[in-house]
Amino acid sequence: MKVLGAIEAGGTKFVCGIGNEQGEVLERVSFPTTTPEETMKLVVDYFTGKQVEAIGVGSFGPIDPIVGSHTYGYITTTPKPHWGNYNLIGKLKEHFDVPMNFDTDVNGAALGELTWGAAKGTDNCIYITVGTGIGVGAVVGGKILHGLSHPEMGHIVVRRHPDDSYEGTCPYHKDCLEGLAAGPSLGRRWNVQGAELSADHPAWEMEAYYLAQALMNYVLILSPQKIIMGGGVMKQEQLFPLIRTKLQELLNGYVQHAALTTDIDQYIVPPGLGDNAGLAGALALANLAR
Ligand code: ADP
Ligand code: ZN
């Protein structure tokens, strides 16, 4: 059994762990995300002496995951203080001479779910996190979807809900999907934290209205075989049936597949790897590191 190192690099905390190619996480620790100097020292200290054979990193972004690019391995244009233009893989390479695999947290999570979780047995899935931001990762034909860089499917344009006059929180686009539907927009629109809103509050119908539009676009563009939705906001379980029904209404029978009709409850699902989805995603990246 291989000894694989996994790093879930988040904007609030870094979770590091050791696991194997069966997706088992054998140990884990977590460090607050402060400055790269402080946080990466803790990360390096953690892995020192652990004899890992490969390291996978699923990171907040935007990042450069394109091997051969001159900024490969960097966290690039993040607005997060201290972390913009930071060479994370370069730092790890100074200390560990093993294969590494660097991708977005959500691309890692999609790969992890496809390898060991809710999308096992498929070749195509998407993983959406609805949390502080909205991020989407995709595996297409068994491979993580890259192009110029990684897709940014949280920032797509959606049609506004007729009852919504909230301007939106995205610093780049204001009322893109993330601007209208990530956790912070819920808090600002309703003046109550998302977690405090009751299950029958109209906020959830509006939230589902936006997320279902996003899913419609993803279904039409990528035709995923499984849609996995995680993140803090998706802890509101009543969102799942609302989103499924709205997606069916929006598609209006255009895409004919049982996954979108009789089997939709098994099509749009929470992470099979539960709260381990992020770290398991990094482990799945490590498993494919070459
Ligand atoms: P992050 O995106 O930073 O990794 P989370 O996925 O936990 O972290 O998302 C945090 C966001 O989700 C916050 O905006 C928070 O208000 C919101 N959130 C967390 N728990 C819930 C909940 N139970 N219901 C609704 N919103 C929640
Ligand atoms: Zn945006």
Image (cartoon, rainbow, N blue to C red):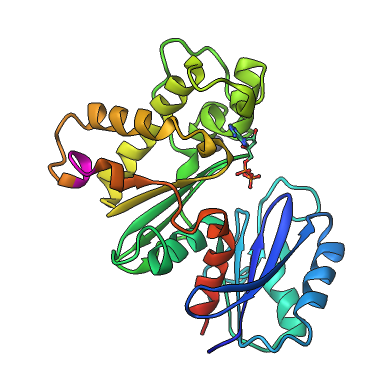
Residue 82 left/right relative to 120: right
Q: Answer with the quarter of the image where residue 119 lies.
A: bottom left
Query: Is residue 215 something one can see in this rendering?
Result: yes
Question: Who is closer to the viewer here, 58 or 158?
Answer: 58
Instruction: State yes or no: residue 210 in magenta.
Output: no
Question: Image point 53% across, 58% down: which residue?
Answer: 277
Question: Who is closer to the viewer here, 51 or 290?
Answer: 51
Q: Main secondary structure of the magenta part?
A: loop
Residue 91 left/right relative to 35: left
Q: Answer with the quarter of the image where residue 90 lies.
A: bottom right
Q: Which residues are magenta?
A: 259-263
Question: Who is closer to the viewer here, 3 or 159?
Answer: 3
What x and y, as percent, mark residue 142? 33, 69
What x and y, as percent, mark residue 50? 73, 85
What x and y, as percent, mark residue 230? 50, 46
Question: Image point 69% across, 62% down: which residue?
Answer: 15
